[in-house]
Amino acid sequence: MTTSPSPSDPVPVPIRVLLPGDQDVVGHLWSKRQVRDGWLYEVGLPAYRNGPGDTVESAEYRVWVRAPEHVQPLDGVSYDGVPVEYLEPPSLVEREPGPRRPSGWVLAKAGGRGPGRGTVHTVDCEEDPAGAPMLTLERALDAAQHPGTRLCSLCGAAAELDPVLKGFDRGFGGDD
């Protein structure tokens, strides 16, 4: 996480903290942290604690709460100086490929006699048979090497398995 520039000793600012049971109290906002699903605010809630002997002294209980569900700004208060921790931006690998599909393959057997008749699909292909056992990479490659077996191009099984079957050097100066 990266932190925005802030003074060495942050000064808390007042903020309304919404408590359970429809209660609220003015507490101190110490910092803000961005998380994947929103924001957390570190707030200090006023409390008492037992001091030496029979004394009671004021104290502050700090806790992280969700914003805006558990906090509300106060009119006339500036929150510009509150230290903020931002999430690191996602890497190029996380941004570009997008969601990944589940790994694995299935063999949809075709009617007829002989080994290797069928089509290899990815596990999330719309054309794969329901309840077909999932194949590891090695088993999918074994099935794909049989003359009667096709690789589905609709789901990408062909694009994933063909380079492994034919070698990665094709088209890169190898024997084409």
Image (cartoon, rainbow, N blue to C red):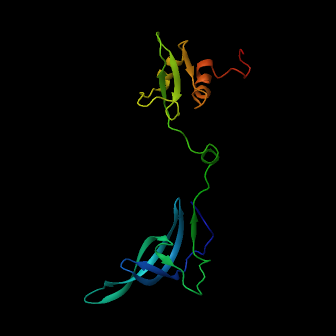
Instruction: Residue at 64% x, 45% y: name it.
Output: 96
Q: Give the answer, above or below, for where 75 lies relative to 144.
A: below
Residue 84 x %, y %? 57, 69
Q: Nearer the viewer, residue 37 or 56?
A: 37
**Is residue 102 shown left or right of residue 175?**
left
- Among all residues in the image, which is located at the extreme left? 54
Instruction: Residue at 60% x, 30% y: name it.
Output: 154
**Is residue 7 shown left or right of residue 128?**
right
- How many marks on residues? 0
Residue 44 x %, y %? 44, 78
Image quadrant for the C terminus? top right
Q: Give the answer, above or below, for where 66 lies relative to 76.
A: above
- Among all residues in the image, which is located at the extreme bottom? 55
Instruction: Residue at 59% x, 79% y: name it.
Output: 79
Image quadrant for the N terminus? bottom right
Q: Nearer the viewer, residue 87 or 159?
A: 159
Instruction: Residue at 60% x, 45% y: name it.
Output: 98
- Among all residues in the image, which is located at the extreme right? 173
Residue 92 x %, y %? 64, 47
Residue 143 x %, y %? 50, 18
Q: Give the answer, above or below, for where 126 lies relative to 27.
A: above
**Is residue 72 shown left or right of residue 5?**
left
